[in-house]
Image (cartoon, rainbow, N blue to C red):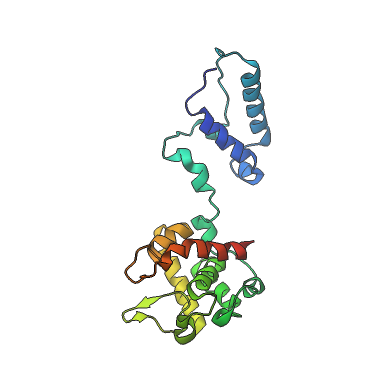
Amino acid sequence: MKIGDDWFTKTMLTSTLSRNEKLSSQMGTTNSEFANLFTSVLNEMMNGDASSSIQPTFPSFIENMTFTNENSNMGMDSFASNSTESLRFQSMGAEKINQVLGGKLKGMGEAFIQAGQRYNVDPALLAAIAQHETGNGTSKAANVKNNIAGMMGKNGLRSYTSIEESIMDMARNISKNYLGMGLTTISKIAGKYAPVGAVNDPTNLNNHWVTGVSKFFGQLKA
C-alpha cells in the first residue's frame, strides 16, 4: 500500500478536528467529510493488497497544508491545556478561589479576579502562583511585607501597603513580562520567574515551582 509521506500527519489532524464540532464549523468543514475519509482509508487498509495505491481525499484546507518537522508536533503544542490563550483572563467566581486560599491570602478571591481583568491574566494562574510562593499565605514575606509573589526590588523583596497592591503588581508583571513576551506555559514562565540554579535560590526551591504552581492551578480549574 503506497501513501504519501505526510498521510499520517494529515490523517491525525483530520481525526483531531473531527472530534471538535465547533472547530470544524469554524473551518467550514462537515463531519461527513471526516467520516468519508476514514471509512475509505480503513477499508483500503483492511481489504487491499500490499501493492494497492491509495489516493485519499482530504478536506481542502488540510490538503493544501504543507507539513514539516517543525509543525509535525502541532498536536501537542496547539492543544496544550496551559497555552497562552488559556492563561489569559477567564471568568470565574470569587467563591471558588476563596475556598482554597488561606493565611494572608484568605478572602482575596475578588482581588485576584480584578487584577486578572485589568491585565488580562487568568485569576487562577495568579492565585496559584501566590499560593505556591507564600505556602498559601503563610510565608514571612506575605505576613511582614504583604509580598505574595516573590517580587523583587532594588533592596530585595518589595514591600507593599496591602495584599491587594501586591496582587495587582504581580498581574501587571505576568501580563507584560511573561505572557506578553511569548512565555506561553507555566513551565516557560518558570524559566524566567523561578529559574533552577538561581543565585538567590540557595536551597533549590525553584526546582518545585512548576509542580507546585501547576498543582494549585489544576485545583482551581477543576
* Quarter of image, res 145: bottom left
Image location (x, y in percent) of residue 76: 51, 45
Q: Position of residue 88 (x, y in %)?
A: 52, 62
User: With 154 as the anchor, is 53 left or right in this view?
Assistant: right
**Closer to the camera, 57 or 94?**
94
Q: Tell me the residue at 62%/15% (across/down).
A: 48
Could you tell me which quadrant the N terminus lies in? Answer: top right
Write down the quadrant of residue 216 in the picture: bottom right
Image location (x, y in percent) of residue 84: 49, 57
In this image, 221 relative to 154: left or right? right
| Quadrant showing the C terminus | bottom right
Above or below, 148 against 219 in this view is: below
Judge whether residue 75 can be spotted in this image. Answer: yes
Q: What is the residue that sits farthest to the front in this orientation?
A: 203
Tell me residue 18's x, y (percent).
63, 38
**Residue shown at the point (58%, 25%) measured from the top left:** 57
Who's the residue at 52% across and 80% down the image? Answer: 138
Residue at left 31%, top 69%? 199
Count of numbered marks: 0
Can residue 88 be seen here? no
